[in-house]
Amino acid sequence: MTTSIVAQRFKLIKSSPSMAAKARVDVLRAAGKQVVDFTIGEPDFATPEHIVQAGIAALMRGDTKYTASSGTPALKAAIVEKLARENGLQFSPAQIVVGCGAKQIIFNAFAASLEAGDEVVVPAPYWVSYPDMVAINGGTPVLVQCPQSTGFKLTPELLERSITSRTRWLVLNTPNNPTGAVYTGAELEALGAVLQSHPEVWLLTDEIYEHFVYGRARHVSPLKVAPYLAERTLIVNGVSKAYAMTGWRIGYGAGPVPLMQAISLLMSQSTTCPSAIGQCAAITALQGPQQCVSDAVALFRTRRDLMAGRLQAIPGIGCTVPDGAFYLFPSVAGLLGLADHNGAVMKNDVNVATFLLEAAGVASIDGSSYGMPNHLRLSFATSAGEIEEGCQRMLAAVTSLSHPQPV
Ligand code: PLP
């Protein structure tokens, strides 16, 4: 009898739906199909030149060796300075850990802290990786539905109801992927008040989209309004989204020293350290001119308005305008029950996403993958031309749907 080489716990996880969607688009394009890709989870432009130059300079200087596991002192100092300047938060370098992307920090935080059966409260819709990262590290994700009626946000009542004696973490993501929801200071204060009466629960706050806020929305770091949570909060952030540096793989965490030491220990026994070159470039990103960030935000704002307007004009699609991040999360509930010209009925959001890909060549990701069925996630991190083209194709495809003939 052959036994599987793959550990049982791998049955608890699946590959990231956004990575899988990207792979599907690549296959279709390689087969010559013209696909408009709305699955993109990263800015569509190059890393700003002054940051690239910093990477090149690092290479030429010979900054090409292992660094300290938790990051170089110079990058930690730049992060401490950034947290003070942009978030009004005071940290020491010992409270900072640099990883291969924010994703690694989150994974390692769960690996370092969860005992079997510990619960992690994850408001849904959520970034696809949180529940799987909890599960593979022995924890139990507790998914809390936060419907459109609450602005896709966790409320104090929902939070209170989801905490048990096993709860170890609450994960908050503001601005949110996939909904673009941005928590106000008052909303965060109210959630903080709930956590105040549950001293055993830690807060993981993922602020990777902090700069992508539009109109009157402002990013507030939860610790700013709930400083009493400092002893049990992990802030996660990175340079991937703000500086179009997804491939450089630099993210960071800020939090209590014992947790930082545990995360660093894990890195020392796994990845050793984040890329030395990436770390040098990240210092320039954080300390250099910030105009590139405001330019990106201004551009994304026009794209958000364009795409939301176009989607609102498509019958059966219900689209609100998000305050942050670079995704729209429209409801496709109005399309369910309709049939395509082959008679195939749209039973759920997965059917709708498949129909749009096959009939219109428009790639999106089903809301079910983010814990909220009957929605799609559409990224507007793509050109205005692609947005126009993709939305026109969607309009044409959706208006070709009809009520199924009775049999
Ligand atoms: N957190 C959220 C909410 C994200 O959407 C992503 C990437 O898509 C990450 C973290 C990971 O970012 P990084 O590239 O720094 O690993």
Image (tube, rainbow, N blue to C red):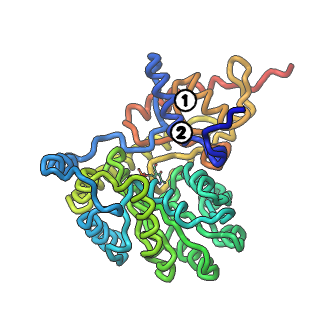
Residue 107 in percent (x, y) is at 50, 56
- Asked if residue 224 is positioned above or below residue 363 in the image, the reply reads below
Residue 326 in percent (x, y) is at 44, 48
Residue that numbered label 2 is attached to:
311
Q: What element carries label 2?
A: helix
On screen, residue 172 versus residue 290, left or right, reads right
- Asked if residue 245 is positioned above or below residue 337 in the image, the reply reads below
Residue 311 in percent (x, y) is at 53, 39
Q: Which mark is residue 394?
A: 1
| Amino acid beneath label 2 | Leu
**Would residue 288 be seen by someone viewing this image from the given angle?**
yes
Q: Badge 1: how crowded within 10 Å, few (<14), some, or many (20+)?
A: many
- Asked if residue 166 is positioned above or below residue 128 in the image, the reply reads below
Residue at the image point whose x is 63% and y is 79% from the top: 198
**Would residue 218 be seen by someone viewing this image from the given angle?**
no
Q: Is mark 1 on a helix, strand or loop?
A: helix
Q: Residue 290's image quarter?
A: bottom left
- Determine contact: label 2, label 1, CB under 8 Å: yes
On screen, residue 223 versus residue 95, left or right, reads right
Residue 296 in percent (x, y) is at 32, 49
Residue at the image point whose x is 64% and y is 60% from the top: 139
